[in-house]
Image (cartoon, grey):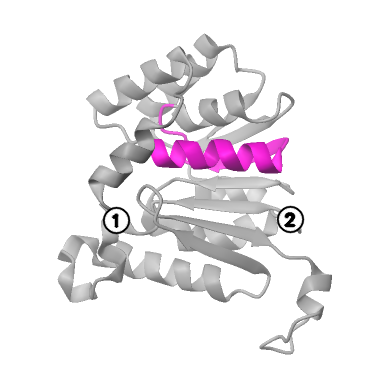
Amino acid sequence: MIIDERLTSYIDSLDRGNTPFLDEIEKYALARQIPVVRKSMQSLLKFLLAVGNPESILEIGTAIGFSALLMSEYGPEKSHITTIEKDGNRIALARENFRRAGKEEKITLLEGDAAEILQNLEGPYPMVFMDAAKGQYIHFLPDILRLMSPGSLLVSDNVLQDGDVIQSRFAVTRRNRTIHARMREYLYELKHRPELETVVLPVGDGVALSVMRSCSDLRDNERQSEEPCC
């Protein structure tokens, strides 16, 4: 846990909960060790949806559709979600969950490798939710930035890796070192790109919130390079 488990449990206990259907999907996923966003992340997503009212949302990493359904349920009534998944078994479950929820017209599921699909998408998207393989975040970033516009919000989940991200690469298991290095690189990019304003929060397994700044904002501040911002 990134923060005290008792404190997390208390905060989660204050939440008023989700719809019965979302609760059913979450219970199904947890029983089968299928990843779904944690309770604290669910609360944050609801808050961001209420504040930003994004009518078009891009999600990278559908799994069985829980987070897409949550965003569709608690986002603006006219919102549409485009979500990407490459695991065939999870795709089948996600499509069935979208059908059962009556959300087939509001959620578009794109099947395949996100690295390839992102290259062919056209934006902008007011909100992007990154919840895929953590080692791929840094590779997805260039296309995600292309699909954003000033004011767009990028929500990157699971960026602190249960606290491992602060460890030396020699303190993490050998099989996790590549992911560890890539996540540190990703966080550095989010915090140092002049077109983004990013905050990293110890919510769930860590979340980074990055907003795309406007060119006028960039011109009003000292830039670290002579490259044009637009």
Q: Where is residue 11 in the image (x, y as percent from the top left)?
A: 37, 39
Q: Where is residue 86 in the image (x, y as percent from the top left)?
A: 44, 37
Element at label 2:
loop
Q: Is residue 194 magenta?
A: no
Q: Is residue 60 magenta?
A: yes
Which residue bears the numbered disc 1?
2
Q: Which residue is drawn at 46% across and 25% down?
A: 16
Q: What stretch is highlighted in magenta?
A: 39-64
Q: How crowded is mark 1: few (under 14 residues within 10 Å), some or many (20 or more)?
A: some
Q: Which mark is residue 204?
A: none
Q: Is residue 184 above or below residue 24?
A: below
Which residue bears the numbered disc 2?
151
Label 1 vs 2, first from the N-terminus: 1
Q: How crowded is mark 2: few (under 14 residues within 10 Å), some or many (20 or more)?
A: some
Q: In this view, does 181 lie above or below 221?
A: above
* Disc 1 to disc 2, C-alpha distance: 29 Å
Q: Position of residue 102 (x, y in %)?
A: 59, 11
Q: In the rendered image, is residue 204 in sight?
A: yes
Left or right, residue 132 beside residue 33? right
Say what amino acid the circle numbered 2 marks: Gly
Task: Identify which residue, 143 or 155, lies in the foreground.
Answer: 155
Question: In which image quadrant can residue 135 be found?
Answer: bottom left
Q: Which-is-in-front pick, marks 1 and 2? A: 1
